[in-house]
Image (cartoon, rainbow, N blue to C red):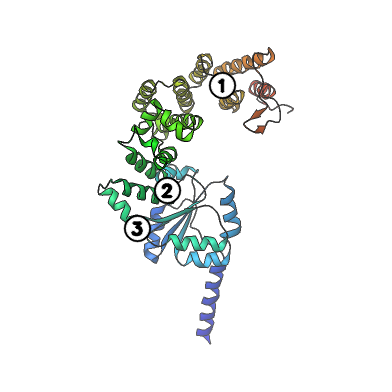
Amino acid sequence: MKKLSIIMSLMLCTSMMFAQGVKFEQEGTTLDKAAAKAKKENKLVFVDCYTQWCGPCKKMIRDVFPQAKVGEYMNTRFVNIKIDMEAKYAEGLSKEWQVSGYPTFIIFNADGKEIGRFMGGSDADGFIRRVEEKSTVDAAANSLEERWNNGERGDAFLKEYLASLTATYKRDDADVVAETLLNGKEENFANDKELADIFMKHVNNPFASSFIYTAQHPEALQAIVGERAVEMKIKSVLGNYTQNLFVKKGVNTVLDENKFTAYQALLRRLKVKDADHYRLTVLISNAEKQGEYIEYVNYIKEYLATPGLDASDMTLANWAKPFSVPGADETAKALMIEVLRERVADIEAGKREAQTKVGNMKLSRPTDELLRMIIQTMETGKLPNQ
């Protein structure tokens, strides 16, 4: 009877464990720690890469992970961890793991090697099905990676490998493979619709030979995808690359001067019409990161004074954000207020119109009113009507 009671108690405990849904390790648990535990327990590691603002992430946490059948499946097979990809403890992981959308779910073996991944929310049954599918080592994908590492570079192979990387959301690796595929085809890839699409989707390095050629000779690609699409592609690549100009140095983020010099040289080489936009945007961002706020405002003033450049009212409002916090540099704040007052004066004088929309979104009030409110808040330290 006593043994029966023990057995029944164990069965009850097991049932309760399953009924609790997915059991996640303590927030902040690293992959190394989870992998060590998985090795001891003969399990895999499941990682939920999420953010606080992601709607589908919240739905998974609220509606899917608590379900008993999901817990029963996951807890017996995986050491489960959740990582807020925007938290301090996760800094750098989104780049290291090539996570570009949320939620992204990654499965690792007990040695910390990725087995598979998938993205997006689903219902309980769909989630279990996708986890099961991605928990099996993809021999074909591993073979492609091995062939790449061994130096294979034939066009057919590169297209196959690119498709595999794209399917697993490994954007950075996919971009490198796409660059390699287009190397040597700079002058004629636009005549091939497949290669043109690959360029538009995957080439995000302004130093890639295919990008440099296209920026200098856009006509062929424009004939395939349209002038506007090519213009937006070039701007997107040049603009997004500025994020790569900053590097971690201890606890600080600093501008890599060598990269910045090379980037400016590239802008000159490509004869980019609004090169000063990219240069000054970087310098404004860097001054803010370093807390050099007088320099920050001076770069903003230089931007506004540069022929051919213009900042919207909403851009000015965003540039004013560092001065809305207590303890902001009073001298720099006064300089920023001057900038905002000058814009309001231009609107009042009819030299420019206040914005009433941002894209297709209608604003609750014209931007001249918004700028006045910001000025008042900066001067008094209080929100209007407080």
The reply to whether residue 305 is in sight is yes
Instruction: Out of 190 and 158, give the one closest to the viewer.
Output: 190
Q: Point out the residue furthest to the top here.
A: 349
Task: Give the SS element for disc 3.
Answer: helix
Sequence-earlier tag: 1 or 2: 2
Judge from the rendering whether residue 199 lies leftward or rightward of residue 354; answer left or right: left
Instruction: Out of 205 and 33, give the one closest to the viewer.
Output: 205
Q: Which mark, by number, is residue 253?
A: none
Q: For mark 2, does the 10 Å Cα neighbourhood hold few (<14), some (14 to 19), or many (20 or more) residues?
A: some
Sequence-earlier tag: 3 or 1: 3
Q: How far, Cα to Cα, is label 3 from label 2?
A: 14 Å
Mark 2 belongs to which amino acid?
Thr
Task: Give the SS element for disc 2.
Answer: helix
Q: Residue at x 39, y 36 (%)?
A: 191
Mark 1 belongs to which amino acid?
Ala
Check disc 1 and report the residue beneath it: 311
Q: How far, Cα to Cα, is label 3 from label 1?
A: 50 Å
Q: Residue at x 37, y 63 (%)?
A: 39
- Vertical placement of residue 218 versus 5, above or below: above
Q: Which mark, by number, is residue 140?
A: 3
Residue 140 placement: quadrant: bottom left
Q: How far, Cα to Cα, is label 1 from label 2?
A: 36 Å
- Vertical placement of residue 318 versus 2, above or below: above
Residue 327 rendering spot, x and y as whole percentages: 57, 25
Report the quarter where the C terminus lies: top right
Residue 272 rendering spot, x and y as whole percentages: 43, 22
Asked whether the residues under the numbered discs 3 and 2 touch, taking CB atoms below 8 Å apart as contact, a structural biologist would say no
Q: Which mark, by number, is residue 166?
A: 2
Mark 3 belongs to which amino acid?
Ala
